[in-house]
Image (cartoon, rainbow, N blue to C red):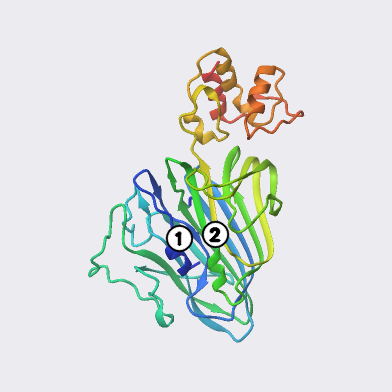
Amino acid sequence: MKKHILLILLMLSGYSVFANDGAFFAKGNQLIPINETDITVRKEILTLKKIRNQFIEVTVYYEFFNPKEDKKITVGFEAFSPEGDVDGSPKNGKHPYMRDFTVELNNSILKYDVAYVSDSLYNKNGTIKSLDMTKFDGNKSGNYVDFFYVYHFEANFKKGLNIVKHTYNYDLSGSIDYNYDFEYVLTAANRWANKQIDDFTLIIDNGEFETFSINKTFFKTSDEWLINGIGKTEDIKGSKNAFVENDALKFHLQKGNIIFQKKNFKVNGDLFLYAQNYLGIQDLEYIPFSYYQEDKIVQPKNDFQRKVLKNLPFARRGYVFQNQDLNQFYKKMDWYIPNPNYQPNAEILTDGEKKWIEKWK
């Protein structure tokens, strides 16, 4: 994640924990009201884009409907503190692994404040009570800190339709198990008056040649997703005490993005997306799809294995090999999507792939 807007009381018992084998940086979240309100969420378009395998770029478009008179309400975003192999200390008073936080309401940029809070009781009587960090005796730095952040602002909602545009970035989390993972709290949308999102669109762009999985929390089948590009899916059955504990949908995305759309979306689960780390795979039994896991591919032991690696950029694009040994090898890869019309052309490969081919000549 990873990675995806305020008081998420439901989140307080559900955030990720890592020992010192990984790092949880942040998770995305919805905008939500501090006070009870009759304002509803008519529409939301949430776009999550993975950038250079380092951070998630979040862009959210909302349409809120206020059925009564103009009103001012406090709206915010709750960001949990990082933990694991990270320093959780604030940076310039803000979350250390979130950046470029902006909110625009009806074409006006809104100013915001940041509060430090330690529990879900900070919003009594519709006001935000921030910790006095000069008197706070909990952990303020290190791998685990005893507070989290609330980015909050005053919003003047006019009667009728109100357009909100919201952006921020947060660093991808990761661990021994996950090359990366990111989360987004969708259930916080239930705090608005209609307790749903009338028209919801989720767009996820993880880049080219990526294999990743999404837990089946807010959806049930692959039919609920559109692959806008070239890719395929497979169902993953979870089991306790296994690497995959929850049922998930695995995506092998050659290019493009994936889209989830739903009307009258009653949110009953949050987004958890992860890409498995492929470690200790011997004799080239498996080659990961992603550019970002090439360093985990073992050294070839013979000429055929060198030929396999040399041809990886073409296999990624679905080349149907005339060499039957290569053809049979890549047909076993779960991410391979044969394309009889694809003709290999080294000149249009990435610079990294050109170097990769030279390496195995």
Q: Amino acid at mark 2?
A: Asp
Residue extending farthest to the bottom is 69
Task: Compute the Cα span from label 2 to label 1.
Answer: 10 Å
Mark seen at residue 270: 2
Q: Position of residue 157 (x, y in %)?
A: 57, 79
Of 158 and 282, which appears nearest the observer? 282
Residue 311 visible, this orientation: yes
**Does 275 sit above or below residue 121?**
above
Q: Nearer the viewer, residue 171 or 232?
A: 232
Image position of 193 (left or right of 95): right
Name which residue lies at 58% across and 64% down.
268
- Estimate the x, y position of residue 204 in percent, counting from the top left: 60, 51
Q: Which mark is residue 14?
A: 1
Picture quadrant of residue 323? top right
Looking at the rendered structure, the number of numbered marks drawn on it comes to: 2
Tell me where residue 94 appears, x and y as whole percent. Answer: 37, 61
Look at label 1 and name its amino acid.
Answer: Gly
Toward the front, the furthest residue is: 240
In the displayed structure, 157 sits above or below 347; it is below
Residue at (69%, 47%) from the top-left corner?
A: 227
What SS does tag 2 mark?
Answer: loop
Quadrant position of residue 150: bottom left
Can residue 1 be seen here? The reply is no
Single out the residue that lies furthest toward the right. 341
Neighbours of disc 2 within 10 Å: few (<14), some (14-19), many (20+): some
Would you say the residues marked 2 and 1 are in contact, meaning their CB atoms lie under 8 Å apart?
A: yes
As helix, strand or loop, the secondary structure at mark 1 comes to loop
Q: Residue at x 66, y 17 (%)?
A: 325
